[in-house]
Image (cartoon, rainbow, N blue to C red):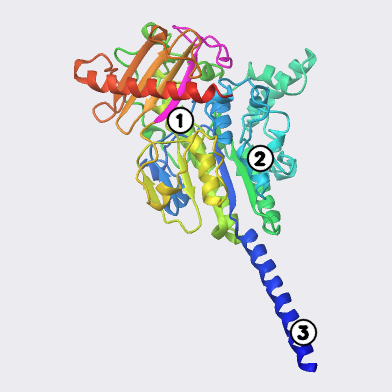
């Protein structure tokens, strides 16, 4: 009897230990689910050391690249903030999100659309964000409330440098600029404008494109944001659930403002001017814009060149070098903030179990084709940096096409959660591990136009008559401009083709000549057009379900 009781007690102890071990195992697995640090950088083109630029100084992003995977042929879905960020965050192309401009709200068009952080909440993640991740004009006032398990952070004033105070008109720290800005703000307020409307009104009179002053990093918003982001990371370390933490940086977006020490990294005379500053030969007129974004800056004085007046904007050599200098300085400033964030991740002991993805939302023209800013289907606007680093995956470089719609499924795959079956992108994990050499034969970008001569309104394209779809392979870019409000949800008709472009990047990396009608390229043009029509047909079939 005593022996039986001992056996029974031993059995109960065994069961209890088994249950505790199982609970510990489950808890450990939950704890081991990787975190995600999601770094968004506004207007960052692939002018980085890890992308081959030997002049620019980006040691922190390069360090991340050295331990991660650099996607050398990555492309955005549409080269402007709102649409491309909507595609990144949902894994869906613009013709599904119906965000083609900077005023359409994503959930007005698709109330039930599921974003990446929203999906991860359902997978047991907490999701938080600070800085520019979505474009504020394309989401609700809570920066897409369904995406965040914690209300979106707005940088606390205490993180700004106390001596300089907040930047004037959201951007500027130069004392004279701040003095003049206050005068224009007072005028706007006296005329009945309030809040951001008063700032917008003042910016019509005073909006320098560059600023170089000797101030600390947190005199500007990105520097203040990263200090708060580090504190948020510190609090996330102590939670038991995995986190998705999105940190957005607004530079190097115009205006090019950054502390003097980053300007001092470069010499003005060494700034590389664009080698080809003309429209492409035989090109399509609506492939270009009239540089509406940069024309809004009050220190921009175009050089009168009538032949180029409707294509981009002609600037003096001195102004070009100043803008490029400002862009490089702003990139290095942003790189320093990224470094602070990554160092904090390391010091908190979080790096070993954190997926890091860094992206710039699209490229940027720096004078090529006589263009500045983005808003095209050309290489300089659509080519965008993408770097992934994940626990247990060796560093590498990928030279086959990828797209921003691939970010959503890749994060899911790396995190070990199911990938939704309705996404437009492909997981890039196989490319990162070396199991596959390619996940797709080409990337697709698109851009709308209002009319055949010039961009009539930079912010509004929802009813654009024309849409340019651009197919980028490893060697070629084929772009087809469709008229009559065609979208890929419509049936392709030859009569709706407005024009076509073909560029060979092996023979013509600067896109100087559209060879779509060149006899030498007829077979290539025909084959790529067939691929584009095949893409349209697949999209029409897919989008008809929604």
Mark 2 secondary-structure assignment: helix
Residue linked to disc 1: 363
Q: Residue at x 65, y 54 (%)?
A: 242
Q: Which residue is drawn at 58% across and 55% down?
A: 34
Q: Is residue 474 above or below residue 354?
A: above
> Mark 3 or 2, which is nearer the eye?
3
Mark closer to the chain start, 1 or 3: 3
Q: For marks 1 and 3, give the CA distance.
A: 69 Å
Residue linked to disc 3: 9
181, 433: nearer the viewer: 433
Looking at this rendering, what residue extends furthest in the front direction? 1
Over which residues does the magenta segment extend? 443-465
Q: Is residue 428 left or right of residue 220?
A: left
* Res 132 quadrant in image: top right
Q: For marks 2 and 1, give the CA distance.
A: 27 Å
Count of picture labels: 3
* Residue 49 appears in the figure: no
Query: Dot 2, how many residues are within 10 Å of its Cα: few (below 14), some (14-19), or many (20+)?
Result: many
> Mark 2 or 1, which is nearer the eye?
2
Query: Dot 3, how many residues are within 10 Å of its Cα: few (below 14), some (14-19), or many (20+)?
Result: few
Q: Is residue 261 magenta?
A: no
Residue linked to disc 2: 118
Residue 13 percent coordinates (x, y): 74, 80
Looking at this rendering, what residue extends furthest in the bottom direction? 2
Q: Which residue is drawn at 43% across and 21% down?
A: 537
* Residue 202 appears in the figure: yes
Q: In this view, does 318 lie above or below 159?
A: above
Residue 507 percent coordinates (x, y): 23, 27
Main secondary-structure element of the magenta-colored stretch: loop
Q: Is residue 452 magenta?
A: yes
20, 507: nearer the viewer: 20
Query: Dot 1, how many residues are within 10 Å of its Cα: few (below 14), some (14-19), or many (20+)?
Result: many
């Amino acid at each position: 009897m005593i022996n039986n009781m001992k056996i029974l007690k031993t059995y109960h102890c065994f069961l209890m230990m088994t249950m505790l071990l199982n609970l510990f195992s489950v808890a450990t697995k939950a704890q081991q689910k990787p975190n995600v640090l999601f770094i968004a950088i506004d207007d960052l083109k692939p002018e980085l050391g890890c992308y081959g630029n030997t002049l620019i100084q980006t040691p922190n992003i390069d360090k991340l690249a050295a331990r991660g995977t650099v996607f050398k042929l990555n492309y955005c879905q549409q080269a402007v903030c709102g649409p491309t960020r909507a595609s990144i965050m949902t894994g869906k192309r613009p013709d599904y999100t119906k965000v083609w401009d900077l005023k359409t709200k994503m959930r007005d068009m698709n109330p039930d659309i599921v974003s990446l952080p929203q999906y991860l909440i359902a997978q047991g993640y907490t999701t938080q964000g600070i800085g520019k991740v979505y474009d504020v004009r394309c989401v609700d006032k809570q920066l897409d409330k369904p995406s965040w398990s914690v209300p979106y952070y707005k940088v606390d004033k205490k993180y700004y440098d106390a001596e300089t105070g907040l930047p004037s008109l959201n951007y500027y720290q130069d004392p004279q600029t701040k003095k003049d800005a206050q005068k224009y703000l007072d005028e706007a307020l006296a005329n009945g404008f309030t809040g951001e409307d008063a700032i917008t009104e003042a910016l019509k009179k005073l909006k320098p494109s560059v600023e170089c002053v000797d101030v600390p990093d947190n005199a500007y918003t990105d520097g203040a944001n990263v200090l708060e982001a580090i504190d948020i990371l510190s609090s996330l370390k102590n939670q038991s659930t995995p986190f998705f933490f999105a940190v957005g940086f607004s530079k190097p977006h115009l205006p090019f403002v950054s502390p003097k020490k980053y300007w001092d990294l470069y010499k003005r005379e060494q700034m590389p001017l664009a080698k080809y500053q003309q429209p492409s030969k035989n090109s399509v007129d609506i492939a270009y814009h009239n540089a509406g974004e940069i024309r809004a800056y009050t220190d921009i004085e175009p050089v009168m060149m009538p032949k180029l007046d409707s294509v981009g904007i002609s600037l003096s050599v001195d102004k070009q070098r100043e803008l490029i200098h400002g862009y490089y300085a702003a990139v290095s400033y942003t790189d320093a903030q990224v470094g602070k964030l990554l160092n904090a991740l390391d010091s908190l002991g979080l790096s070993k179990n954190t997926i890091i993805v860094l992206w710039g939302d699209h490229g940027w023209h720096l004078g090529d084709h006589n263009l500045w800013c983005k808003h095209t289907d050309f290489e300089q606007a659509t080519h965008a940096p993408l770097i992934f680093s994940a626990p247990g995956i060796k560093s590498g470089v990928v030279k086959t096409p990828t797209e921003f719609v691939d970010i959503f499924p890749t994060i899911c795959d790396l995190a070990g959660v199911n990938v939704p079956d309705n996404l437009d992108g492909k997981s890039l994990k196989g490319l990162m591990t070396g199991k596959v050499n390619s996940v797709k034969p080409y990337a697709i970008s698109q851009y709308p136009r209002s009319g055949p001569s010039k961009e009539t309104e930079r912010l509004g394209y929802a009813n654009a008559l024309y849409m340019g779809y651009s197919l980028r392979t490893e060697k070629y870019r084929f772009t087809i401009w469709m008229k009559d409000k065609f979208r890929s949800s419509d049936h392709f008709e030859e009569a709706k083709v407005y024009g076509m472009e073909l560029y060979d990047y092996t023979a013509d990396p600067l896109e100087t000549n559209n060879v779509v009608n060149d006899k030498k390229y007829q077979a290539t043009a025909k084959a790529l057009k067939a691929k584009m029509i095949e893409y349209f047909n697949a999209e029409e079939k897919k989008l008809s379900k929604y």
